[in-house]
Amino acid sequence: MEVGDYLKHYTRPSKETYLQYHTNATRLLLDVSEYCKVHVSQLTFDLIIEFFEANFNIRFVYFESDLMYKWFPDKKQTIKYRLTSKSTLSLVDSSFCNVCSGMTIPDFETQRFIVYINQDVVKSRVMFTILHELVHIYFHLMSSVYDKVLVSKTSSNYSDSYPEEIAPLEDEANIIASILFLNDQKLLNYINIGTTFEQLIEASQMSKPALHNRLMNFLIYNCSCQEYYALSIVQGYKNDEDWAILTLQQFQRELQEIA
């Protein structure tokens, strides 16, 4: 499941917790890289989808509000974004669209997963929700960490959205989805060539809030920056300030030397 306003009401995990999520993300990226026979830095959203559709029994059901179709009966039902191959469309009550971003229903007897995705949002949000639900399948459902239907809420109050036992799964799915969207090696390559914030949005297809949060996590956890300093760098980067880009490039060189 995936929370619609997650980025607005985000509490950062401890460094230990984040690094565990990061380790899990790296494991998944290496699995996708091996399957697709491309370097991790070359992985794309499409290749990640290809990996999951080839290795897991998944059917995607996109849904949207039926309200427009009630007003305009001749309106053609269409999947807005062709992001997956095994896909169908379902119309639901508008109230459901307002509270659900995505949902995964597992059938453990057949090892089949039905992934419902709200398409009444922008493309970057749909992509993020898909990655979020796939993380649930890979880390939580296949390993039986959780054996119930996972429903993604769009509550504006994230801390009150989920039972205590589910919240850590949501944190992990959100963080790993963010890393899948723009993994470390790809991010470092973009930084190295001086890619601007706006160019990075276009290249990664992430939303501005999602990219902001990805950069914050990268600086805080990968580069050991204090949050206030990380925020200063990200804001400077968003404003195309030379010092911010040079600072990011310095971190990029230091991380490459460590690697």
Image (cartoon, grey):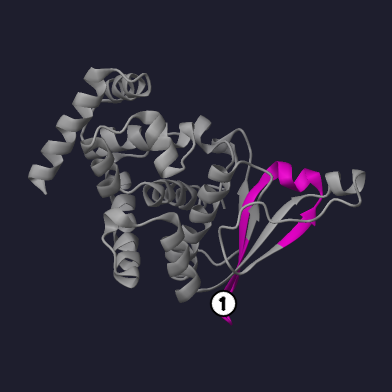
Please tell me whether residue 248 belongs to the stretch shown in magenta.
no
At which x and y percent is residue 84? 56, 63
At 39% from the left edge and 55% from the top edge, which residue is drawn? 44
Q: Nearer the viewer, residue 108 or 117?
A: 117
**Label 1 Cα crowd, 10 Å radius (few <14 / some 14-19 / many 20+):** few
Task: Classify residue 164 as left or right of residue 219.
Answer: right
* Image vertical order of residue 80 relative to residue 110, above or below: above
Please tell me whether residue 96 belongs to the stretch shown in magenta.
yes
> What amino acid type is highlighted by mark number 1?
Phe
At which x and y percent is residue 88? 69, 65
Residue, far bottom: 110
At 72% from the left edge and 41% from the top edge, which residue is drawn? 98
At 50% from the left edge and 53% from the top edge, which residue is drawn? 132
Badge 1 is on which residue?
Answer: 108
* Image vertical order of residue 198 relative to residue 116, above or below: above
Q: Nearer the viewer, residue 118 or 15?
A: 118
* Image vertical order of residue 223 relative to residue 48, above or below: above
- SS for tag 1? loop
At which x and y percent is residue 76? 81, 54
Residue 202 figure quarter: top left
Residues rendered magenta in the picture: 89-115
Residue 257 figure quarter: top left
At which x and y percent is residue 2? 56, 48
Task: Classify residue 167 as left or right of residue 246.
Answer: right
Inspect this view and state whether residue 12 appears.
no
Residue, far left: 257
At 52% from the left edge and 30% from the top edge, which residue is drawn? 8
Inspect this view and state whether residue 246 appears.
yes
**What is the count of numbered marks?**
1
